[in-house]
Image: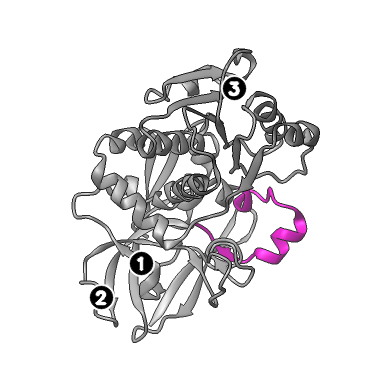
Amino acid sequence: MINIVYRLVAPKLLEEVYTDLDLEKGVIVRPTYLSICKADQRYYYGKRAPEVIEQKLPMALIHESIGTIVKDNTGTFNVGDNVVMIPNLPQRDEEFYGENYRESSKFRSSGSDGFMEEYVSLSVDRLIKLPDDINLEVASFIELISVSVHAISRFLKFSHSRRNTIAVWGDGSFGYITALCLKVMLPDSEIIVIGMHTEKLSMFTFADKTYLASEVPEDISIDHAFECVGTSSANDAINQIIETINPEGTVSLLGVSEFNISVNTRKILEKGLRIFGTNRSTREDFKRVIELLEENENMVPYLESLITQVIEINTLDDINHAFEQDKNLRFGKTIMKWEI
């Protein structure tokens, strides 16, 4: 069967590419809702290093997506089932490394075609059926939520058991999701959010406290911290965490930066801090997100408030329009309703 893949061939230039899709293998899914991520924007606008852009393109974008089962050669799903698609593509088993940390693994929209396709062929383990009553627009960015859940799951393994106060640095969409997941998964902990913008912090109504980074009290007591800032601003955020956090606290680094940063290693040593990084997520994290959404109905309205716009996609021009509109967002998510 001829399939259409919508590939970015150069910054801001998309093309339709015709490929052959084998209908007799795996599971065939029709994408329905796709969520634009900051990583997609960096590729679309050529904000990565030129050598990286040259290596990655041409490539279909988007790794946050759900779809509908069209055909399942494994007999696992029914035609019409709504499923979330897992973008991580492990190539082989490795005893000591998770599938999202193996050098051999591939990832959609980062070296492999993402979900901007007419149909997508996946192995059955890259799909999870969604509950019948789930909000499909929210479900489109389960992948992003799963990264927060993965980081929190690792944090619970690495950190000491005093978790009275946990602070999230970052007032963007990812900081919002991470703080919300912390509030749900650790209901006995006080969750504090520290950011740069009063109007963004006002969105964090579920948090126990919010502070501007310039107004953090000197006597604040923080047991552990999550950094969700990234970019060049990560330098100041991480060093503020190091200065503020209590001794032997655990720091989760989640923000992506194209720049090398300098941190106060002397203070890290003095305090005996544990600092760990998190990248992407696993199938188990996707399953955990779905469980959390089913068990905590109050999560959904908070996540719905992140959806700033839903743009119906019927042409290549619509895709370009969606990326242009998303670029102008100061907060929230752009969802593409995939009708192309």
In the rendered structure, which disc, 3 or 1, sits on the residue that comes first in sequence? 1
How far apart marks 2 and 3 lie (CA) works out to 47 Å
Front residue of 27/8: it is 27
Which residue is label 2 attached to?
76
Are circles 3 and 1 on residues that touch, CB within 8 Å? Answer: no
Helix, strand or loop under label 1: strand
Which residue is label 1 attached to?
127
Are circles 2 and 1 on residues that touch, CB within 8 Å? Answer: yes
Which residue is label 3 attached to?
196
Instruction: State the image coordinates of residue 236 (x, y, percent, origin top left).
Output: 71, 29
Q: Is residue 162 left or right of residue 39?
A: left
Residue at 60% x, 52% y: name it: 44
Helix, strand or loop under label 2: loop
Front residue of 261/199: it is 261
Instruction: State the image coordinates of residue 88 (x, y, percent, origin top left).
Output: 50, 65
The extreme front residue here reads 161
Q: Which residues are magenta?
A: 42-62
